[in-house]
Image (tube, rainbow, N blue to C red):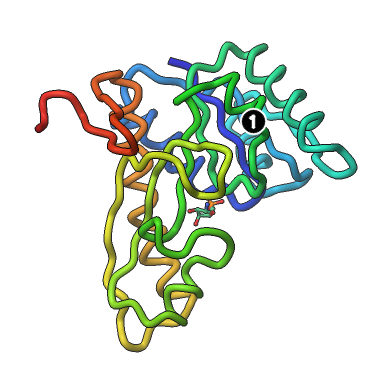
Amino acid sequence: MKLGILLSGRGSNFLAIADSIAAGRIRNAEIAVVISNKPYAPGIVAAEEHGLNAHVIQSKGLSRADHDKQIVACLREHNVDLICLAGYMRLLSPEFIAAYPQRVLNIHPSLLPAFPGLDAQRQALEYGVKISGCTVHFVDEELDHGAIIAQKIVPVLPDDDEETLSARILEQEHICYSEAINMVLSGEFEIVGRRFTPKGRG
Ligand code: GRF
C-alpha cells in the first residue's frame, strides 16, 4: 500500500511512520510521497534527506479548492492509497474528502472530542483536565471531527506546562499513529455511525 504524507511543520509523526515501516511495525506499506504546503518545513527537508519523493505545494495565495486540486493530482500521480495528515495545518475541501473516502487520517494531540483546533495541549492545561492524550481519526470536512480509530491516554501532572505535556503526548502519538495505520491498511474493520470497530472484536 502506498502512503501519502501531508505536513506543514516539524514532521516528527511522519518520521515515526517512516521508522515504523523500516522496522516492520507497519506492514506492506511504503511512503510514496510527502507533500508540504510550507516551503522549508523541517518535515519536508527530512523527507528529502530520506530520499523520498518530496513536494512543496504552497497554499499561500490559492483558494482551498485550487490548492487541494494540486495536492490530489500529486497524490494520484504517486498512486497513493492512504493519506496521513501529520501536522498538516489546513482543513481539506469537500472535493479532497470525496476523492479519498475513508482514506485520509489525522492525528490530534487531545482526547477528541475534547479540545479540537489549535493549541490542544494548552487548552487541556487551562481547562484543568487530569488526563489527556491523542486521537487518530478519519478526516471529514469538519475540524478534528471524523470517526475515531485509536486513542491513547497520558496523565496531566501537577507541575506540567505546555512543553512537558506536549512531549508526553507526542511519545504516544508516535505509537498510536502506526497502530491506527495498520488497522486501516488491514481493511479488517467496519464503521457504523461514528464507531470504528476492528473486525473480530465485538
Ligand atoms: C502533533 O502534535 C499532531 O498531533 C498535530 O500537530 C503536531 C505535529 O507534530 N496535529 P509533528 O510535525 O508531527 O512533529
**In this image, 109 relative to 71: left or right?**
left
Neighbor class of circle 1 (other Cα within 10 Å; few <14, some 14-19, many 20+) is some
Which secondary structure, mark 1?
A: helix
Decide if ligand 1 comes within 8 Å of the CB at mark 1.
no
**Residue type of the residue flagged with mark 1:** Pro
Relative image position of residue 161 (x, y in whole percent): 45, 82
* Vertical arrangement, residue 96 with respect to residue 17, above or below: above
Seen at 71% across and 17% down, the residue is 73
Quadrant containing the C terminus is top left
**In this image, 93 relative to 18: left or right?**
right
**In this image, 156 relative to 125: left or right?**
left
* Vertical arrangement, residue 5 with respect to residue 150, above or below: above
Q: Tell me where residue 67 sits by quadrant.
A: top right
- Among all residues in the image, which is located at the extreme front? 193
Q: Tell me where residue 69 sits by quadrant.
A: top right
- Among all residues in the image, which is located at the extreme right? 61
* Vertical arrangement, residue 128 with respect to residue 121, above or below: below
Q: Which residue is mark 1?
A: 94
Relative image position of residue 101 (x, y in whole percent): 50, 22
Quadrant containing the N terminus is top left
Relative image position of residue 13 (x, y in whole percent): 48, 46
Q: Nearer the viewer, residue 75 or 47?
A: 75
Relative image position of residue 43 (x, y in whole percent): 62, 44
Seen at 35% across and 17% down, the residue is 28
Q: Nearer the viewer, residue 42 or 70?
A: 70
Seen at 21% across and 29% down, the residue is 198
Q: Nearer the viewer, residue 40 or 182?
A: 182
Seen at 32% across and 46% down, the residue is 175
